[in-house]
Amino acid sequence: MEIAYIPSPSRGVYELFGVIPLRGYAFCIIIGVFVAVWLGNRRWIARGGRPGTVADIAVWAVPFGLVGGRLYHVITDYQLYFSEGQDWVDAFKIWEGGLGIWGAIAFGAVGAWIGCRSRGVPLPAWADALAPGIALAQAIGRWGNWFNQELYGRETDLPWALHITSSTDGRVPGYYHPTFLYESLWCIGVAVLVIWADRRFKLGHGRAFALYVAAYCAGRFWIEAMRVDEAHHFLGMRLNEWTSIVVFLLAVLYIVLSARLRPGREEVVEPGASDEDTDDDGAAVKLDKKSEDEDSETKDSDAGKSDAEKSEDADEKETAEAETDSSSGSSESETDDSSSSVEAKDEEAESAKKA
C-alpha cells in the first residue's frame, strides 16, 4: 500500500516558446553559484575585504570548476561515453548531468588561485570566506539530480521514498532512497557547521575550508554507500567512498598542521581594503578624512613658513589687538562724555526752577 512518497518530475527540460530549452539541472547549478558568491561576498567583507572581490575571483573559479567536475565524471565513468555502442560526443553534454565534486573543487581551486594572484589576495582566506557558500551551492545543485531522475539509493518503502518513473538508461521504475535529498540536507548542515565554527574559533589560513571538506566527506561516505547506480569498485567499496576517506584524512591533517604552524586568523585579507568601510548592503563607503587632511595641510603650511613671515604674522596680530583696545577705549570715552552732558543738563534745570 502506497502511503506517501516523493514524486519525480515528469521531465527535466521545459521549452520556452517551444524553442528555448530550460533545463532544471542547469538552473540548479546556476542558482547554487549565485548563492555561493552572494554569501562568500558578505563573509569576505566582514573579514575586511572589498565588495566584489569574491565575484571577480569566481569568474575564474567557476569555469575551471565546471571543466574539472566534468573531466572527473567522464574519466571515472568512461564506459558511459567510450565503450562500444556509446557516442563519445555525449561527454560534452554537461546539461544532461554528470559533475564530480572532487574534480570541480580541484580545478576550481586552480582557477581561484589565478584570480587571487591577479587581485593580490591570499587563496586560503578567500577559500575560508567561500566555504559555507560552496556547501549551499552543492545543496541546491543536488536537486538537479531530482530533475534528471538520477543518483538515487536502494529500494525502500519509507514514506519519503523517491518515486522513479523513467525506464531509460537502465532505470527500473520503483521507490528508492532519495540520496540526492540526503546529500542536500547534509550540505546545509555542513554550511551551518562551518559558519558556527568560524565564529566560535576564528578559523583562518584555510581551516574553515578544510572543515567544510572534512564534514562533506564524512557525509558523502555513507550516502555514497547507499547508491545503486553503476560505479567502479575497489576492495568491496565504490571509488567515491575511497576518495571520501582519503580527502577526509587530508583535510583533517591540514587543520591540525595549520593550527600549529599558523594559529589565529589573517589580520589583512586584501591589501588596501582597510582604508575603506562598508555599509549593511556591502557597498564600499570611503572614510571621512577631510578634516584630518585639512589639519595636516595647516600644520605643514605653518612648518614651512620662514622666520620673517612668522614675525609679520606676530606684528599683524599685535596690530589687530591694539585696534581692538583702541575701539573699546573710544567707546568708553564716549560713554563718559554722554554721562557728563546729562549731569550738566540736570544742573541747569535745577537752577532754572530756583530762579
Image (spheres, grey):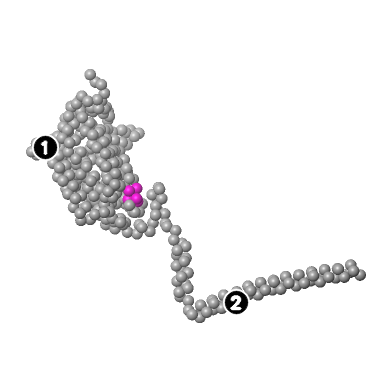
Depth order, front residue of 231/258: 258
Q: In the rendered image, is residue 79 in sight?
A: no
Q: Residue 319's mark?
A: 2
Tag nearer the camera, 2 or 1 = 2
Q: Is residue 2 shown above or below 348?
A: above
Image position, residue 209 (x, y; %): 24, 48
Q: Is residue 139 shown above or below 253?
A: above
Considering every residue shown, the one lying at the far right of the view is 355
How many circles with numbers are drawn on the protein?
2
Q: In the rendered image, is residue 274 in sight?
A: yes
Image position, residue 321 (x, y; %): 60, 74
Residue for point 48% across, 76% down: 305
Which of the image's four quarters has the C terminus?
Answer: bottom right
| Residue marked by disc 1 | 237
Residue range highlighted in magenta = 41-46
Which of the image's four quarters has the N terminus?
Answer: top left
Depth order, front residue of 226/256: 256
Instruction: Point out the tag, 2 or 1, that comes first from the N-terminus.
Output: 1
Lateral position of residue 322 relative to residue 113, left or right: right
CB within 8 Å, label 2 to label 1: no
Image position, residue 56 (x, y; %): 31, 51
Residue for point 13% across, 40% down: 239
Considering every residue shown, the one lying at the far top of the view is 1
Amino acid on which the number 2 mark rests in the picture: Thr
Amino acid on which the number 1 mark rests in the picture: Met
Q: Tell me the crowding category of disc 1: few under 14, some 14 to 19, or many 20 or more residues within 10 angstroms, Cα based.
A: few
Depth order, front residue of 209/171: 209
Residue for point 60% across, 77% down: 319
Image position, residue 127 (x, y; %): 26, 50
Considering every residue shown, the one lying at the far front of the view is 354
